[in-house]
Image: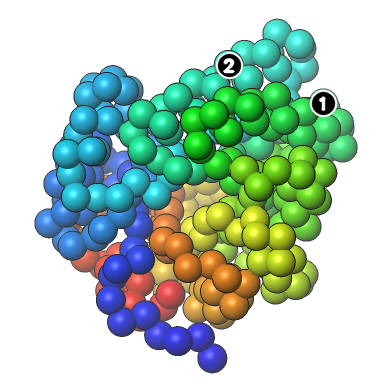
């Protein structure tokens, strides 16, 4: 049985979870709530620019867990693939500037490009930006997405596929991000998490819940405990595999974004203790 969480020392919130807040509001709100860690989505950097964002984050008491997101490597043209590489190099620069040790990769897919071909573009793309990531001291975590996104968001849809990519690339700089929303259904999840552990490639753990019914594919995720995912069981698997990092709450929800975000953060804190 997974040991119950008794404090918030490993709790990390994604800025996308409190999307109505600016980066400064996220920093202030998380600090007030006693949340120690933040994962920054790149759009949160844009309004005030990278230098000001880095100054804000480094002047706060929050640790930066990761930057979201890089990836989207497949494209129909060579120019499109080159632009994707440039954007990932920019993400590496951003991660380094704000002190994020990790970039989460949503790997990408394009309608009309066969999934095996798209996965080859993903492997080639990661290999192409790896020297910059190594020089910056920034790791790259492949996040497999639920198969409902296989047409246009990610050709990497199972943890086995992510593990195979990591093995193919063969760098300690590249690993896997386990997101329960995308992977809870997979009957090989426990054994593939163990595989991550043996390879030393388990780099991130994201939580939210799967609502029934799900009203909209992207922006209808639930607060932990509101859906059907056995989150604590999966946390037990990742911890048994050696993961001791932050537990990152990543909730896309049009409904929850419309609520009072300070109250929402307090609900997250309670759900974290009760259901993670």
Residue at figure coordinates x 63%, y 27% from the top left: 131
Residue at figure coordinates x 56%, y 63% from the top left: 180
Percent x, y for residue 107?
Answer: 66, 37
Residue at figure coordinates x 59%, y 77% from the top left: 240
Locate the C terminus by quadrant: bottom left
Helix, strand or loop status at disc 2: helix
Q: Nearer the viewer, residue 1 or 208?
A: 1
Res. 36 image quadrant = bottom left
Q: Which mark is residue 1?
A: none
Helix, strand or loop status at disc 1: loop
Dots 2, 1 in contact, CB < 8 A: no
CA distance separating discs 2 and 1: 23 Å
Q: Residue furthest bottom?
A: 1
Residue indicated by mark 2: 86
Locate the N terminus by quadrant: bottom right
Q: Residue furthest front?
A: 135
Q: Which mark is residue 112?
A: 1
Res. 58 image quadrant = top left
Picture layout, residue 34 above or below residue 1 = above
Is 187 left, or right, of 134 in this rendering? right
Picture layout, residue 179 above or below residue 46 = below
Q: Nearer the viewer, residue 72 or 82?
A: 82
Mark yes or no: residue 109 visible. yes
Mark 2 or mark 1, earlier in chain: 2
């Amino acid at each position: 049985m997974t040991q119950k969480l008794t404090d918030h020392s490993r709790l990390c919130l994604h800025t996308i979870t409190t999307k109505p807040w600016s980066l400064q509001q996220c920093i202030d709100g998380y600090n007030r709530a006693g949340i120690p860690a933040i994962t920054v989505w790149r759009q949160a950097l844009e309004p005030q620019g990278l230098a000001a964002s880095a100054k804000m984050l480094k002047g706060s008491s929050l640790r930066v867990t990761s930057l979201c997101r890089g990836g989207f490597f497949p494209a129909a043209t060579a120019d499109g693939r080159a632009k994707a590489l440039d954007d990932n190099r920019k993400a590496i620069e951003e991660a380094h500037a704000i002190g994020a040790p990790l970039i989460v990769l949503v790997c990408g897919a394009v309608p009309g490009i066969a999934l095996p071909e798209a996965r080859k573009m993903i492997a080639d793309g990661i290999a192409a930006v790896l020297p910059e990531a190594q020089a910056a001291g920034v790791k790259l975590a492949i996040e497999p997405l639920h198969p409902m996104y296989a047409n246009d968001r990610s050709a990497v849809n199972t943890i086995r596929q992510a593990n195979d990519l990591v093995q193919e690339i063969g760098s300690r700089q590249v690993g896997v991000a386990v997101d329960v929303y995308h992977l809870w259904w997979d009957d090989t999840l426990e054994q593939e998490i163990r595989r991550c552990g043996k390879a030393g490639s388990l780099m991130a753990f994201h939580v939210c819940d799967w609502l029934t019914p799900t009203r909209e594919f992207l922006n209808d995720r639930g607060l932990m405990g509101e859906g059907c995912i056995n989150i604590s069981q999966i946390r037990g698997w990742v911890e048994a595999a050696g993961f001791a990092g932050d537990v990152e709450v990543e909730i896309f929800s049009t409904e929850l974004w419309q609520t009072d975000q300070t109250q929402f953060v307090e609900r997250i804190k309670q759900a974290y203790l009760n259901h993670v």
